[in-house]
Image (tube, rainbow, N blue to C red):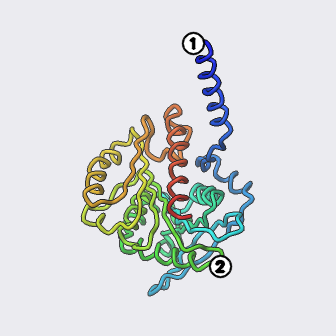
């Protein structure tokens, strides 16, 4: 009887392992080093658009990628890092589109560069300096314009969310305090808004942080406490051994960044599909 029970237990375990192995894994976006190739190889339709901002002469240069699906798709704003618009941000948008979202990645430095240009018009450290001059109000105004433009697409559904990285992670969190119709916000290693601003957040927020990025991850306990007291949904994950910008730098920190990327992107897709579909 003992032998039989052991055999049954072993068979159950084996079947579970086979079933687990058969489940498709979520494909993560490329790292910074492979982004250009991923864009070149993508089967999805991506295009640039210049989106008008109400009350301004500036148009936001925006990369838009459409998913391959037969029904209408929710809109996901992909908010770039402090480095501005890069191939890596565009590749993240492309992978988000692979998951079924209309991915919209605006160059939030549009109109701020020499000659009214955007990210690619700056030299040296000019991008960082220019981003430092963007106010939360201006960022929200630009994101509002891009969001409204995308939701008006014939192929767009009615729900929208944000995902942002580094500076863009902070912008994603901040935008959730501003836009009452937002359905989800994902924050990759970004700092939080002030507690009194959090009271306005209408949607679940997912926070993803590197365990070795104390500048940012040290803010998580107070953020969790404030969000809990306000009865807001905030789900933080701190990945052991991972550093700042782990999704961009997947080959760093002896595998910790890659593990954080795999786990964090899976959590991202799960939340967005639950909240936006």
Q: Which residue is mark 2?
A: 154
* Residue 110 location (% of width, % of height): 51, 73
- Secondary structure beneath disc 2? loop
Instruction: Tell me, yes or no, whether the two marked residues, 2 and 1, touch with CB atoms within 8 Å.
Output: no
Tell whether 152 sits left or right of 192.
right
**Quarter assignment of residue 201:** bottom left
Quarter of the figure that contains the N terminus: top right
N-terminal label among 2 and 1: 1
* Residue 17 location (% of width, % of height): 63, 31
Q: Residue at x 55, y 47 (%)?
A: 266
Tell whether 81 sits left or right of 233.
right
Which of the pair 79/225 is nearer the observer?
A: 225
The numbered dot on residue 75 is none
Question: Callout 2: 10 Å neighbours few (<14), some, many (20+)?
Answer: few
In this rendering, the label closer to the viewer, 2 or 1: 1
Q: Residue at x 54, y 62 (%)?
A: 85
């Amino acid at each position: 009887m003992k032998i039989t029970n052991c055999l049954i237990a072993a068979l159950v375990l084996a079947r579970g392992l086979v079933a687990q192995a058969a489940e498709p894994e979520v494909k993560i976006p490329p790292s910074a080093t492979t982004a250009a190739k991923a864009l070149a190889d993508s089967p999805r339709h991506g295009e640039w658009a210049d989106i008008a901002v109400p009350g301004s002469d500036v148009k936001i240069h925006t990369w838009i990628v459409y998913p391959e699906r037969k029904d209408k798709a929710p809109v996901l704003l992909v908010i770039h890092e402090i480095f501005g618009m890069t191939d890596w941000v565009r590749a993240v948008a492309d992978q988000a589109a692979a998951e079924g979202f209309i991915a919209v990645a605006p160059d939030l430095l549009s109109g701020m560069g020499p000659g009214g240009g955007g990210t690619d018009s700056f030299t040296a450290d000019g991008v960082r300096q220019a981003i430092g001059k963007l106010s939360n109000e201006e960022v929200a105004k630009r994101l509002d314009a891009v969001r409204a433009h995308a939701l008006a697409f014939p192929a767009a559904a009615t729900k929208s969310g944000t995902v942002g990285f580094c500076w863009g992670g902070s912008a994603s969190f901040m935008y959730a305090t501003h836009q009452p119709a937002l359905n989800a916000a994902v924050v990759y290693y970004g700092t939080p808004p002030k507690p009194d601003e959090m009271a306005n957040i209408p949607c679940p927020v997912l926070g993803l942080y590197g365990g070795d990025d104390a500048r940012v991850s040290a803010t998580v306990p107070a953020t969790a406490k404030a969000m809990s007291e306000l009865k807001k949904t905030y789900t933080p994950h701190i990945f052991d051994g991972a550093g700042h910008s782990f999704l961009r730098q997947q080959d760093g920190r002896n595998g910790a960044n890659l593990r954080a990327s795999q786990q964090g992107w899976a959590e991202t897709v799960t939340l967005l599909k639950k909240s936006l579909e």
